[in-house]
C-alpha cells in the first residue's frame, strides 16, 4: 500500500471462499483460521461466499445451495461471529457483478491470459472454458474494491489474483485521474500459507483433487483424519534438529507446517520438540492434535446445518450490511465512469 493509500483508506479486511465441495485443511489453516484471527484483532472484517465465482465452472444447482450453506456453517463453526464480521454470499449483493463488469472494461486480455489459475483450470482446451472463468480475476477485484478493502488474507495460491486487483485499482485511478480505489495488500502469513497434498508433496492440498486421501476435509470424522495422516506419504528418516534439515523433504516439511499451524507454534519449535523422532511417533501426535482442533468444528457445523433457515437469515442480514457499504462506493464509481444512475434505496 502506498503511504497516500494508507492515510486515506480506513483499514478493512475482505476475503472469500468458493462454495465448491467440502472445505479442506488448507482452506481452514490458510484462510478461515486467519479470518477469525483478523476478526478478533478489531479491524472491520467482511467475509464472502463467492457463489458467482463458483458458477464459472458447472455446478449442480442443489449442490451449490448446500455447499453455500455448509460453507457459512464452516465459517461460523470456526469462530466467525456474524455479528462482529459481515458474512454473506456474493450473489445477494448486486454490486459485485456490476463493478465486475466495469473492471472487465479496465483489465486487459493479456493480464488475464497470464493468470496461472486460468491456465490450470482451463487446461489445454481453453476454447471450451466459460467466459466467466477467464474474467474470474476481475470479479475478484470487484469483490475486494467494492468495499475499498485494504487487506486481503489469502493462501499463497491467490497472491497473483490480489496483485491483479492492485493493477486494476492503479489503472482505474490512472485512467480516470482519481485516487478512488485503494491499492490492496495481500496478507499471506503463518506456517500454512500453502498446505500440500498428503499424497504428493509437490501438489497443493485441494478440494478438487480426485483423491480424497490427499486432503483432510473439515467434515471428516476422527478415524478418517487419523487414517489419512497415518497413510500420508513421508520418508523414513526421523525429524531433524533444525528446519534446514527439511529442505529437500517436502512431505515431511508439510506435516511439520500443518502441526505448527494447528498448535499455533512456529515450525522451528515443532522440529525442536520432535527432533530425532520418527513418523511412527509424529503422525499419531499430529492426528490427535488435528482431531482435537477439528472435531469441535465438525460437531458445530452439524448443529448449524440442522437449521438451514437460520443460516439463510444470517446470510441475508450480512448481505444487507455489505450492501450498505457497497452502494455509495458503487454510486461514486458510476459517477467517475460517467454512467447515469438514479439513486437506489
Ligand atoms: P478458494 O475457494 O480456492 O480458496 C479459499 C482460500 O483458501 C486458500 N487455500 C489454501 N491455503 C493454504 N493451502 C492450501 N492448500 C489452500 N487451498 C486453498 C486460498 O488461498 C484462499 O485464500 N479466488 C478465491 C476466492 C475469492 C476471493 C475473492 C479471495 C473470490 N473473491 C476476494 C479473496 C478476496 C478462491 O478461489 O479461493
Image (tube, rainbow, N blue to C red):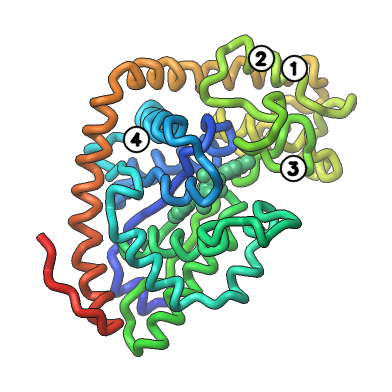
Of callouts 4 and 3, the N-terminal one: 4
Above or below — where is 333 with respect to 153?
Answer: below
Q: Which label belongs to residue 203?
A: 3
Residue under label 2: 226
- Residue 153 visible, this angle: no
Q: Quadrant location of residue 141? A: bottom left
Q: Quadrant location of residue 222? A: top right
Cβ of mark 1 under 8 Å from ligand 1: the answer is: no
The spot of residue 160 in percent (x, y) is 59, 62
Q: Secondary structure at mark 1?
A: helix
Q: Secondary structure at mark 2?
A: helix
Of callouts 4 and 1, the N-terminal one: 4
Of callouts 3 and 1, the N-terminal one: 3
The spot of residue 344 in percent (x, y) is 13, 64
- Mark 3 Cα shell of 10 Å, populated few (<14), some (14-19), many (≥20): some
- Mark 4 Cα shell of 10 Å, populated few (<14), some (14-19), many (≥20): many
Cβ of mark 2 under 8 Å from ligand 1: the answer is: no
The spot of residue 332 in percent (x, y) is 22, 75
Q: Secondary structure at mark 3?
A: loop
* In the foreground, 226 or 133: 133
Q: Which label belongs to residue 216?
A: none
Residue under label 1: 230
Amino acid at each position: 500500500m502506498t503511504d497516500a493509500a494508507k492515510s486515506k483508506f480506513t483499514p478493512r479486511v475482505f476475503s472469500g471462499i468458493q462454495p465448491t465441495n467440502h472445505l479442506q485443511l488448507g482452506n481452514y489453516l490458510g484462510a478461515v483460521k486467519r479470518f477469525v484471527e483478523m476478526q478478533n484483532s478489531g479491524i472491520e472484517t467482511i467475509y464472502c461466499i463467492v457463489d458467482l465465482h463458483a458458477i464459472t465452472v458447472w455446478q449442480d444447482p442443489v449442490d451449490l445451495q448446500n455447499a453455500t450453506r455448509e460453507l457459512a456453517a464452516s465459517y461460523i463453526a470456526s469462530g466467525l461471529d456474524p455479528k462482529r464480521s459481515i458474512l454473506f454470499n456474493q450473489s445477494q449483493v448486486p454490486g459485485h457483478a456490476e463493478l465486475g463488469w466495469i473492471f472487465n472494461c479496465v483489465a486487459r486480455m493479456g493480464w488475464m491470459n497470464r493468470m496461472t489459475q486460468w491456465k490450470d483450470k482451463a487446461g489445454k482446451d481453453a476454447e471450451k472454458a466459460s467466459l466467466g472463468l477467464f474474467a474470474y480475476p476481475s470479479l475478484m477485484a470487484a469483490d475486494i474494491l467494492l468495499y475499498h478493502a485494504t487487506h486481503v488474507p489469502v493462501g499463497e495460491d491467490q497472491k497473483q489474483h490480489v496483485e491483479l486487483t492492485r493493477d486494476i485499482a492503479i489503472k482505474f485511478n490512472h485512467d480516470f485521474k482519481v485516487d478512488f480505489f485503494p491499492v490492496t495488500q495481500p496478507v499471506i502469513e503463518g506456517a500454512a500459507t500453502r498446505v500440500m497434498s498428503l499424497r504428493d508433496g509437490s501438489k497443493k492440498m485441494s478440494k478438487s483433487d480426485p483423491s480424497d486421501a490427499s486432503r483432510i476435509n473439515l467434515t471428516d470424522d476422527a478415524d478418517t483424519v487419523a487414517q489419512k495422516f497415518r497413510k500420508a506419504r513421508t520418508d523414513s528418516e526421523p525429524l531433524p534438529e533444525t528446519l534446514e534439515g527439511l529442505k529437500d523433504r517436502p512431505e515431511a516439511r508439510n506435516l511439520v507446517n500443518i502441526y505448527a499451524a494447528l498448535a499455533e507454534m512456529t515450525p522451528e519449535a515443532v522440529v525442536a520438540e520432535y527432533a530425532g523422532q520418527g513418523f511412527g511417533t509424529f503422525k499419531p501426535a499430529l492426528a490427535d492434535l488435528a482431531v482435537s482442533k477439528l472435531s469441535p468444528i465438525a460437531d458445530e457445523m452439524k448443529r448449524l446445518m440442522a437449521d438451514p433457515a437460520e443460516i439463510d437469515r444470517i446470510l441475508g442480514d450480512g448481505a444487507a450490511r455489505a450492501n450498505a457499504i457497497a452502494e455509495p462506493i458503487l454510486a461514486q464509481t458510476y459517477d467517475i465512469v460517467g454512467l447515469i444512475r438514479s439513486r437506489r434505496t
